[in-house]
Amino acid sequence: MPESEVVAVILNYKRSKDTIECITALRQAIYPALRILVVNNGSPDGSIDEIQSTFPNIEIVNTGHNYGYAGGMNFGIKRALQLKSEYLFVANSDTVVEQDTISILVEALASHPKAAAATGTICYYENPKRIWCADGDINFWRASSFCRTKLPGKHQIREGGIVPVTFISGCAFLVRSSAIEEAGMFDERFFMYLEDSELCSRFIGKGFELIYVPAVMIRHKANQDRIEPFLLYYSIRNRFLFLRLSAPPFAGFVGFVYLSVVTAVKIAIWSLVRRDLSKSAILAIRDYRAGAFAEGHGLVLNEMLKLK
């Protein structure tokens, strides 16, 4: 029986070395029916030329503008759907898969026909014994999604088989093309952050399942602990948007109160120790109320902070 075709959609923005390493790992995958598609998300640094020279036969699509994770990935997903593959492997360019990643995830979805998407154990690139995300759940009460297994310094994952979850990180996952066609792609109002939570919620609302495969190991060059103003901006604005779009009424109300109180307390603290963060948080709330979504003021935030 022939293997189901998979198209890997990889988003590049100013990360040619990461993208090249990501592609190299995918090309070493023990899965012949794999096609790789790179999305150049308006990267202005010429990185796409380096990628093209390294892999002259790889398909690259250009967005012409930075549309964030959500918009950039949608650009690639649209092209991938035209190729009529059964599955899409959607991944950040700063991820590195093992040789059996694709084959195990395909087998997992094939054995779970109600599942829309599957992911594995995502670890830190520099320290694979430290888990970045595994075993995820949406938590409307806290206005976000979380991973039940996230233990710094340890490598403790569930033994045994596949685990049902309600959240899969957009960092790296395999998804059925038919599920995307039924539920839709990423909501581009999010630009970046929480777009994966909203899509997972939509999958579940359509009656699909989501699964976590502990045996699959994916390394991720994740940021560590420092909070940057533009990342905070998208996180706060999009958590409010996520609640509005996805949460049931009562859970959404509780989540809205929780997020409002926590954000207000943090703004008060940041105003004393990190004024750049307090200003970013305030602008995020203002933009949410004004309906300034997608890119919003995130990409010009650093310049705005310098002027104040």
Image (cartoon, rainbow, N blue to C red):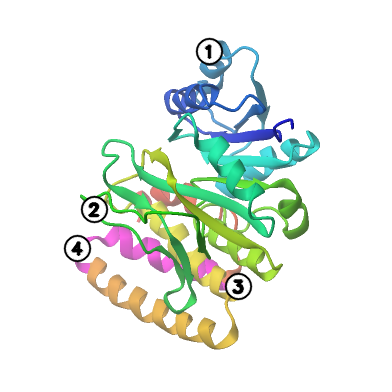
Give me the disc on residue 273.
4
Q: Is residue 240 above or below residue 27?
A: below
Coordinates of residue 138 in the picture (x, y in percent): 49, 69
Q: Secondary structure at mark 4?
A: helix
Of tags 1 and 2, the one toward the viewer is: 2
Judging depth in this view, the residue of 40 and 165 nearest the camera is 165
Q: Amino acid at mark 3?
A: Ser
Q: Are marks 4 and 3 in contact (CB under 8 Å)?
A: no
Q: Amino acid at mark 1?
A: Thr
Point out the tag, 3 or 2, that comes first from the N-terminus: 2
Circle 3 sits on which residue?
246
Of tags 4 and 3, the one toward the viewer is: 3
Circle 2 sits on which residue?
152
Point out the tag, 4 or 3, that comes first from the N-terminus: 3
Point out the tag, 1 or 4, that comes first from the N-terminus: 1
Q: Is residue 230 above or below residue 200?
A: above
Q: Amino acid at mark 2?
A: Pro
Left or right of 202 on screen, residue 26 = left
Q: Quadrant of the N terminus?
A: top right
Q: Is residue 280 magenta?
A: yes
What's the CA distance linking mark 1 and mark 2?
35 Å
Judging depth in this view, the residue of 110 and 146 nearest the camera is 110
Q: Amino acid at mark 4?
A: Val
What's the CA distance linking mark 4 and mark 3?
34 Å
Q: Quadrant of the C terminus?
A: bottom left
Q: Visible in this render: residue 193?
A: yes
What's the CA distance linking mark 3 and mark 2?
30 Å
